Image: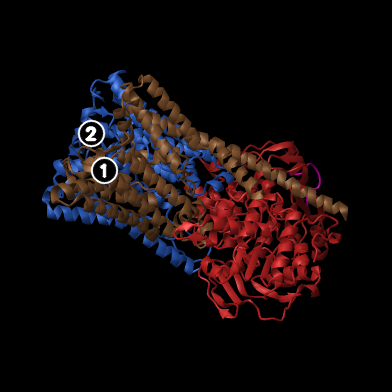
C-alpha cells in the first residue's frame, strides 16, 4: 500500500529558525513520500508550527534546504508554496468572513474569465471539493454564518481545491465531531492512494495511529525520530520520544500544604455562561493544582470566569471559605487577592511598548497612591526593583520596553505584577509556551518557590512534563467538564498515562473509531 | 432536480436575507420619507423641476460616498476626498476658461490626475507604513493648498460649453449627471462583486491574513483602492463643474463628513471587507431627503447636519446591538455543537 | 515637564541585554531625541525666517500673534492627545470647542456671569459632551472614528441652531469684564516691582501653561494617567490587570472635551466673540501637533512638550512663509509636504532602529 523507500516528494533538511530569544527549529528534518500519510508529532513548542510555516512560505528558514519533487526550492510566499503544489489547512481559521463558501474555497486560485470571476466554474470547483468531503453546504452562504465545525470543513475543502502533491493538515479535527473526522480521514486515505503525500499534525494520538503510515517526532526543534514506519512503534514509545528522558520530572523538595481549614480557592458545582457544567475543585495554600486538557477544553474560560469576565450561572466559588462573587478583575485582585497570568502574554499579559516599571507597577498604584492619585516615583521604582531582582528579570533598566525582553523574562514580568500586588491565589495559564528550555526550568523553580511561600496556585498547561514536574494533583478537563483527577507521584510514565486516559475517555484504548 | 430545488431555495434565502438587510431598511425609510414629503408638499415635489433638483443634488453625495466606500473596503480611510475633488474641479474649470483646453482633454486630465493622486496616497501608505488616516490628512492639506493656488479667490465659470449643456441635460426628466453617478455605482458594485481585482480587494479588507495565505497582495489592494477612490473623485469633480454655476475655493470643503456618512449608514464596516454600494446610494438618498424636508419646511439648514449626525450615531448603536445578539446566537450554536461532540464520544465510549 | 520620561516609541531604546540594573540609568529618556530634533528645526527655521525678513522678529506684529496661535493650538493638540492616549480619535474636537464656547456665550449674554464662572460653565459643558462621546464608544464598542464623526455632525447642527435661536447676529458678543484684556495683554502688563515681562508674550499663554501642567502631571505622575496610557497600549491586558477600561475611555474623552472647550474659549477671546464657527479649523492642527511631537496614533504614548513643539513647528512654518510673502495659496502645499517628509523620516528612523534592535537579539 505504501512504498516508504521511494523518492521523497518533499524533503526538508537541517532546518534552523531563530526567533528573538528562542530557537524554534534546530536542524529539523522532514521526509515525505508520495502516497503516504505522515505524522508530525511533538510537544507544544517543539517547532511543529514553525516547520509548517516554513513549508508554506510564511517563514524563511535561517539555514537548511527544501527539496520538492527532486528540485531544490526556496519559498518566499504562500504563492510559491501553492505553485510548488503544497496545500495547507492552518490551525488558525483563515477565511474571509463575508465571502461565500464557494469563494473561500477557491480564494487561492480564483477561476477567471477575462477580468471577471468565473462564477460557474467557481461553484463547480467548490462543489467538487465539498463532494469529496461528502458535504452539503450552501455554496452561497457567507462563511460567517457557518458553525465552527462547518468553517473548519470549508477550510479543509479549500486545501483540496487544487491538484496538490503535498497536503499539510495542522490539527484539522480540533472542531470536528467523530463522524466528520471519520469522513475526513476516509478522504485522506483516498488521496493517499491517488499518490498525494499528506502530513498530519494532531494532538489526538488515536487519530495518528489510525491513519498515518510514517512518523517524524520533533523535540526542541530537532527531529528525534525521522520518517519511521509507524507500525514499528508503540504509542508509548512515541510518547516517550516526544517527551524525552531529559524532561523527566525535575525533583523539587516537597513543601508543606496547609490541609487544615478551608481551601484558599474552592469551586463547588460551578456552571458558567460559556458552558462549564458542575466544575468542582479546590486549591489550598502552598499547593499547586494542575488543570490539564486539550486546547478548547475550557480551562482558560474557567480562569476568566473566576476573574469575573464570564458569568457564573450556578454553583459557588469560595475564597478562604467565604462565598465570592467576583464581578471584575479589579474586584478579584483587590478584594479576593486572585491574580491571573494569561496564556497569551503578548496580547493579554504585557504592555509591549511600555517600560518595565509600568508593566509591573500597574497592580500596586491603588495601594501606593497619595492625594490626587499621585504616584510616588521612588516608592514605585523601589517596588519594581525589588521584584525584578527577586525574580531575576534581566533587563537594562526600569525603562526598558517589555517588548524587547526575551520570552522567559517577559513571562516573569507578567508574573511580577501579581506578586507585587500580593495576591494569595494565582492562576497561571500556559506559562512556558515559546520559552527555551533553560528559562523554562528556571520558571518551574520559581513557581515551586511561590507555592512553598504559601501561595495557592492553579496551573493550566498543555505541557504534560511541566504538569508532572509541578502539580501536586492534576485535574483533567474535557469539553467544559471535569473528567477526573489524578494524584501526582512525580513518576512521569504512570501519571501521564493516567492523565491521557482521562483525556480520551476512560475506555479509549479499546476504542477503534477509525478503520485502517 | 436537486440543483433546481437548491437553486430555488438559495434564491429564497438570499431574498430573505435582503429583507432583513440594512439596504431594505434604508429603502423603506427612503420611500416612506419621500412619500411623506410628497404628501406634505401637496404633490408639488413630483413636478419635473423638483424631481430634477433632488436628483441632480444627489449626484455628488453618491460619488463621494462611493469614493470613501472603496477605501473602506480595504480597511483604509481617505480624508482627502474633499480637497482632491475641489482641486480637480477648479483645475478643469481653469484649464478650460484660462487656457482654452478642449473639454474632453480637460476631463481626461482630471480623471487621470485623480487616479494618480489616489494611487500616490496608496503608495505612501504602503511604503511608509504610516497610518492611512495621517497620510491622507497630509495630502488633504496639500491638495487644499493646490486648489487655492489654482483658483485663488475667484469663482471660475467655464462658460456655456458642451460641459454645461451636458450638466443640465435630462433624460425623461432624470438629469444625465445623476445617471452617470448611478452608472458609476453600478460599475463599482459590479467591480467589487464580479471582477477578480475587486474580489481580491474585499478579501484583503475582510481578512488580510487569509488573503496573504491565498497569495493576494494586501499592498496592491490598498494602492488599487486608493487609486479607484481618486478616479471616482475625478468623476465627481467633472460633474460638479458641469452642474455648478461656477467653481471656487469652497468646492469640496464640506465633502468629508457626507463621504463617510453614506457608506457607514449604508452598512460598511470601518475594519474593511464589508461594504454595500446599494446601501451607500440609498443612504445618500435618505440624507438628501433630510435636506429636501428642510427646504420644504424652510427650516434652518443646521437641522440637516444635526439629523444626519444623530442618524449615524443611532445606526452604529443599533448595528452594534444587532451584532451582539448575533454573537450570542452563534455562541449558543457552538454550545450545541459542543454538546454534540460530547454526546458522540460518550456513546462511543459506552459502546466499547 | 518630563511627561514622556516613562514612555516612548518601541525600538528607540536599545539596551545591552542581560544585565540586571542596580542604579538608575542616566541616559536620556526615550523620545527626547525626537523633541530635541523638533526644537532644533524650530530654531533653525526661526533663524532662517528672521534672517530673510527682519519683520519676523517684530514683537507686536509677528511674535505676539504667533505665540497666541501656538497657545491656542497647543491646547487643541492636547485635546486630541487625550483621545489618542487611549488609542482613540476625536474628530469632533472643533465642534466640542464650539459647543463649549456656545455655553460660555450664553453664560455671559443671558445669564450675565463674570468671566471665570462663565468659563467654568463652558468647560463643564465640554467635559459633559466629551464624556457622553466616550460613553457611547465604550458602551457600543464602535470605532471612535465613527462615533466622533457623527458627534461632529450632530454638534455642527445643534450649535448653529442654538446660535440662530438665541442671538440675532449668529454670535454672542457680550463680553464680561476682563475678556478684552486677556486678548491684548502681554507679559509686559504683568509686573513684579519694576521688572515687567516681554511685550511679545501674550498673557493667554498662561492658560496653555496651566493646561500643560495639569495634563502633564496627570500622565506622568498619577495613577489615572498611567492607566489611560496602559488602556491605549493594550486594552485587553489593561482589563486583565484590573484597570477599569471603560471608565478610563470615558475619562479620556471627557478630558478631550474639556480641553477642546478651553481652546474654544481662547479662540473666542482672541476673536472677541462667540460664534458657531469657532473650532471649524481645529481638526487638522489637532492631529499635527501631537503626531509630530511623538504621540502615537495607536495609543499608549503621549508627549505634552512634544505637542507644544509640534504645534509650534506648524505655526512657525505658517507664520514664516506668510512673512516671506508666500501667499495663502501656497502655504498649505508647503505645509503638507513638510509634514509628509517629517512623518516619513521619523517613521523610517524608528523602523530602522527597531530592525536593528531585533537583529541584535
State left or right for residue C256 relative to residue A404.
left
In which quadrant will I find the C terminus of chain A?
Answer: bottom right
Taking depth in this image into account, of C239 and A440 the one nearest to the observer is: C239
Image point (23%, 51%), residue name: B104
Q: Earlier in the sequence, mark 2 or mark 1?
A: 1
> Label 2 neighbourhood size at 10 Å, few (<14), some (14-19), many (20+)?
some
Q: Is residue B349 above or below residue C218?
A: below
The quarter of the image holding the N terminus of chain A is bottom right
Real-space Cα distance between discs 2 and 1? Answer: 12 Å
Specify whether residue C298 is in view.
no
Q: Residue C21's x, y, as percent?
A: 51, 61
Q: Which residue is mark 1?
A: C70
Residue B306 in magenta stretch: no
- What color is chain A drawn in? red
Looking at this view, is C356 or A514 the one in front? A514
Note whether C265 is above or below C296 in the view shown.
above
Q: Which chain is brown?
A: B
Residue drawn at 43 percent across, 51 percent down: B191
Residue B241, by quadrant, is top left
Residue A440 locus on image (x, y percent):
65, 64
Is label 2 in a helix, a strand or a loop?
Answer: helix
Whether residue C140 can be seen here? yes
| Chief secondary structure of the magenta portion | loop
Q: Which chain identifier belongs to the blue chain?
A: C
Label 1 residue SS? helix
Q: Which residues are magenta?
A: A257-264
Residue marked by disc 2: C270
Amino acid at each position: 500500500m505504501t512504498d516508504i523507500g521511494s523518492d521523497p516528494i518533499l524533503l526538508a533538511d537541517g532546518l534552523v529558525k531563530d526567533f528573538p530569544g528562542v530557537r524554534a527549529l534546530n536542524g529539523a528534518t522532514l521526509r515525505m513520500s508520495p502516497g503516504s500519510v505522515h505524522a508530525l508529532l511533538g510537544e507544544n513548542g517543539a517547532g511543529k508550527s514553525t516547520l509548517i510555516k516554513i513549508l508554506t512560505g510564511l517563514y524563511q528558514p535561517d539555514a537548511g534546504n527544501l527539496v520538492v519533487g527532486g528540485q531544490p526550492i526556496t519559498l518566499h510566499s504562500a504563492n510559491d508554496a501553492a505553485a510548488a503544489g503544497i496545500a495547507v489547512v492552518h490551525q488558525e481559521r483563515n477565511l474571509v468572513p463575508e465571502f461565500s463558501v464557494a469563494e473561500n474555497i477557491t480564494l487561492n486560485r480564483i477561476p477567471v474569465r477575462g477580468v471577471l470571476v468565473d462564477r460557474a466554474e467557481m461553484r463547480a470547483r467548490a462543489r467538487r471539493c465539498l463532494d469529496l468531503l461528502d458535504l452539503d453546504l450552501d455554496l452561497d452562504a457567507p462563511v460567517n454564518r457557518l458553525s465552527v465545525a462547518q468553517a473548519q470543513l470549508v477550510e479543509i475543502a479549500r486545501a483540496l481545491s487544487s491538484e496538490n502533491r503535498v497536503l499539510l493538515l495542522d490539527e484539522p479535527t480540533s472542531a470536528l465531531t467523530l463522524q466528520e473526522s471519520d469522513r475526513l480521514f476516509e478522504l485522506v486515505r483516498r488521496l493517499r492512494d491517488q499518490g498525494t503525500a499528506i502530513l498530519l499534525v494532531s494532538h489526538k494520538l488515536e487519530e495518528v495511529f489510525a491513519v498515518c503510515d510514517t512518523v517524524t517526532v520533533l523535540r526542541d526543534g530537532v527531529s528525534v525520530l525521522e520518517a519511521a514506519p509507524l507500525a514499528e512503534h508503540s504509542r508509548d514509545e512515541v510518547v516517550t520520544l516526544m517527551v524525552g528522558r531529559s524532561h523527566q520530572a525535575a525533583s523539587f523538595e516537597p513543601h508543606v500544604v496547609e490541609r487544615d481549614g478551608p481551601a484558599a480557592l474552592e469551586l463547588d458545582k460551578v456552571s458558567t455562561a460559556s458552558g462549564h457544567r458542575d466544575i468542582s475543585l479546590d486549591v489550598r495554600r502552598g499547593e499547586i493544582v494542575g488543570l490539564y486538557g486539550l486546547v478548547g477544553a475550557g480551562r482558560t474560560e474557567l480562569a476568566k470566569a473566576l476573574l469575573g469576565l464570564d458569568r457564573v450561572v450556578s454553583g459557588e466559588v469560595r475564597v478562604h471559605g467565604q462565598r465570592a462573587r467576583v464581578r471584575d478583575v479589579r474586584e478579584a485582585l483587590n478584594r479576593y487577592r486572585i491574580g491571573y497570568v494569561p496564556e497569551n502574554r503578548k496580547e493579554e499579559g504585557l504592555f509591549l511598548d511600555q517600560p518595565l516599571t509600568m508593566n509591573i507597577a500597574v497592580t500596586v498604584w491603588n495601594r501606593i497612591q497619595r492625594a490626587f492619585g499621585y504616584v510616588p516615583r521612588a516608592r514605585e521604582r523601589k517596588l519594581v526593583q525589588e521584584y525584578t531582582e527577586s525574580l531575576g528579570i534581566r533587563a537594562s533598566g526600569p525603562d526598558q520596553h517589555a517588548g524587547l525582553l526575551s520570552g522567559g523574562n517577559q513571562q516573569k514580568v507578567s508574573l511580577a505584577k501579581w506578586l507585587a500586588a500580593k495576591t494569595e491565589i494565582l492562576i497561571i495559564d500556559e506559562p512556558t509556551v515559546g520559552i527555551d528550555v533553560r528559562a523554562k526550568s528556571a520558571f518551574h523553580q520559581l513557581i515551586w518557590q511561590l507555592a512553598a511561600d504559601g501561595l495557592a496556585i492553579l496551573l493550566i498547561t498543555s505541557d504534560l512534563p511541566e504538569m508532572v514536574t509541578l502539580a501536586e494533583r492534576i485535574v483533567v478537563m474535557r469539553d467544559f467538564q471535569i473528567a477526573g483527577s489524578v494524584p501526582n507521584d512525580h513518576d512521569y510514565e504512570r501519571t501521564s498515562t493516567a492523565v491521557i486516559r482521562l483525556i480520551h475517555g476512560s475506555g479509549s484504548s479499546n476504542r477503534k473509531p477509525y478503520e485502517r | 432536480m436537486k440543483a433546481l430545488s437548491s437553486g430555488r431555495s438559495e434564491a429564497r434565502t438570499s431574498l430573505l436575507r435582503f429583507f432583513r438587510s440594512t439596504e431594505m431598511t434604508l429603502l423603506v425609510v427612503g420611500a416612506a420619507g419621500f412619500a411623506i414629503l410628497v404628501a406634505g408638499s401637496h404633490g408639488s415635489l413630483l413636478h419635473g423641476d423638483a424631481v430634477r433638483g433632488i436628483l441632480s443634488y444627489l449626484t455628488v453625495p453618491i460619488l463621494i460616498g462611493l469614493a470613501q466606500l472603496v477605501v473602506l473596503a480595504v480597511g483604509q480611510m481617505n480624508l482627502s476626498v474633499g480637497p482632491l475633488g475641489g482641486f480637480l474641479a477648479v483645475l478643469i474649470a481653469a484649464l478650460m476658461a484660462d487656457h482654452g483646453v478642449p473639454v474632453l482633454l480637460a476631463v481626461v486630465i482630471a480623471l487621470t490626475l485623480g487616479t494618480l493622486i489616489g494611487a500616490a496616497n496608496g503608495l505612501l501608505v504602503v511604503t511608509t507604513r504610516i497610518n492611512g488616516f495621517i497620510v491622507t490628512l497630509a495630502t488633504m492639506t496639500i491638495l487644499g493648498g493646490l486648489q487655492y493656488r489654482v483658483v485663488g479667490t475667484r469663482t471660475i465659470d467655464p462658460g456655456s460649453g458642451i460641459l454645461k449643456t451636458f450638466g443640465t441635460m435630462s433624460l425623461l426628466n432624470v438629469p444625465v449627471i445623476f445617471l452617470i453617478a448611478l452608472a458609476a455605482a453600478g460599475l463599482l458594485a459590479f467591480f467589487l462583486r464580479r471582477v477578480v481585482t475587486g474580489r481580491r480587494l474585499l478579501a484583503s479588507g475582510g481578512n488580510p491574513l487569509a488573503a496573504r495565505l491565498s497569495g493576494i497582495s494586501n499592498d496592491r489592494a490598498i494602492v488599487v483602492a486608493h487609486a479607484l477612490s481618486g478616479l471616482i473623485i475625478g468623476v465627481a469633480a467633472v460633474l460638479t463643474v458641469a452642474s455648478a454655476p461656477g467653481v471656487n475655493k469652497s468646492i469640496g470643503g464640506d465633502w468629508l463628513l457626507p463621504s463617510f456618512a453614506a457608506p457607514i449608514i449604508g452598512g460598511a464596516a470601518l475594519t474593511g471587507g464589508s461594504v454595500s454600494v446599494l446601501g451607500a446610494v440609498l443612504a445618500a438618498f435618505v440624507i438628501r431627503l433630510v435636506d429636501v424636508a428642510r427646504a420644504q419646511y424652510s427650516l434652518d439648514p443646521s437641522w440637516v447636519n444635526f439629523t444626519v449626525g444623530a442618524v449615524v450615531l443611532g445606526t452604529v448603536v443599533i448595528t452594534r446591538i444587532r451584532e451582539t445578539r448575533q454573537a450570542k446566537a452563534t455562541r449558543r450554536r457552538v454550545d450545541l455543537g459542543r454538546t454534540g461532540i460530547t454526546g458522540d464520544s460518550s456513546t462511543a465510549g459506552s459502546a466499547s | 515637564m518630563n511627561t514622556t520620561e516613562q514612555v516612548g516609541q518601541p525600538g528607540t531604546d536599545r539596551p545591552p541585554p542581560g544585565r540586571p540594573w542596580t542604579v538608575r540609568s542616566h541616559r536620556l529618556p526615550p523620545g527626547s531625541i525626537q523633541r530635541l530634533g523638533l526644537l532644533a528645526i524650530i530654531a533653525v527655521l526661526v533663524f532662517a525666517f528672521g534672517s530673510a525678513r527682519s519683520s519676523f522678529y517684530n514683537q507686536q506684529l509677528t511674535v505676539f500673534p504667533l505665540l497666541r496661535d501656538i497657545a491656542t493650538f497647543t491646547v487643541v493638540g492636547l485635546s486630541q492627545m487625550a483621545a489618542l492616549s487611549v488609542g482613540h480619535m476625536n474628530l469632533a474636537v472643533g465642534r466640542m470647542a464650539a459647543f463649549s464656547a456656545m455655553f460660555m456665550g450664553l453664560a455671559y449674554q443671558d445669564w450675565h456671569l463674570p468671566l471665570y464662572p462663565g468659563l467654568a460653565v463652558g468647560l463643564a459643558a465640554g467635559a459633559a459632551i466629551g464624556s457622553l462621546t466616550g460613553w457611547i464608544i465604550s458602551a457600543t464598542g464602535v470605532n471612535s472614528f465613527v462615533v466622533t464623526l457623527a458627534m461632529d455632525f450632530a454638534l455642527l447642527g445643534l450649535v448653529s441652531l442654538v446660535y440662530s435661536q438665541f442671538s440675532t447676529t449668529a454670535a454672542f458678543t457680550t463680553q464680561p469684564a476682563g475678556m478684552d484684556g486677556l486678548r491684548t495683554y502681554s507679559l509686559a502688563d504683568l509686573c513684579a516691582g519694576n521688572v515687567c515681562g516681554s511685550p511679545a508674550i501674550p498673557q493667554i499663554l498662561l492658560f496653555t501653561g496651566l493646561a500643560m501642567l495639569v495634563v502633564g502631571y496627570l500622565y506622568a505622575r498619577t495613577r489615572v494617567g498611567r492607566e489611560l496610557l496602559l488602556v491605549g497600549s493594550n486594552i485587553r491586558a489593561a482589563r486583565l490587570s484590573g484597570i477599569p477600561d471603560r471608565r478610563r475611555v470615558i475619562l479620556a474623552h471627557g478630558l478631550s472635551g474639556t480641553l477642546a472647550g478651553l481652546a474654544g474659549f481662547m479662540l473666542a477671546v482672541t476673536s472677541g466673540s462667540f460664534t458657531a464657527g469657532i473650532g471649524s479649523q481645529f481638526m487638522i492642527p489637532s492631529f499635527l501637533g501631537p503626531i509630530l511631537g511623538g504621540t502615537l496614533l495607536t495609543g499608549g504614548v503621549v508627549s505634552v512638550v512634544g505637542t507644544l513643539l509640534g504645534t509650534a513647528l506648524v505655526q512657525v512654518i505658517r507664520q514664516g512663509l506668510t512673512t516671506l510673502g508666500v501667499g495663502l495659496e501656497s502655504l498649505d502645499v508647503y505645509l503638507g509636504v513638510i509634514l509628509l517628509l517629517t512623518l516619513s523620516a521619523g517613521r523610517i528612523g524608528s523602523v530602522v532602529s527597531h530592525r536593528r534592535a531585533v537583529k541584535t537579539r
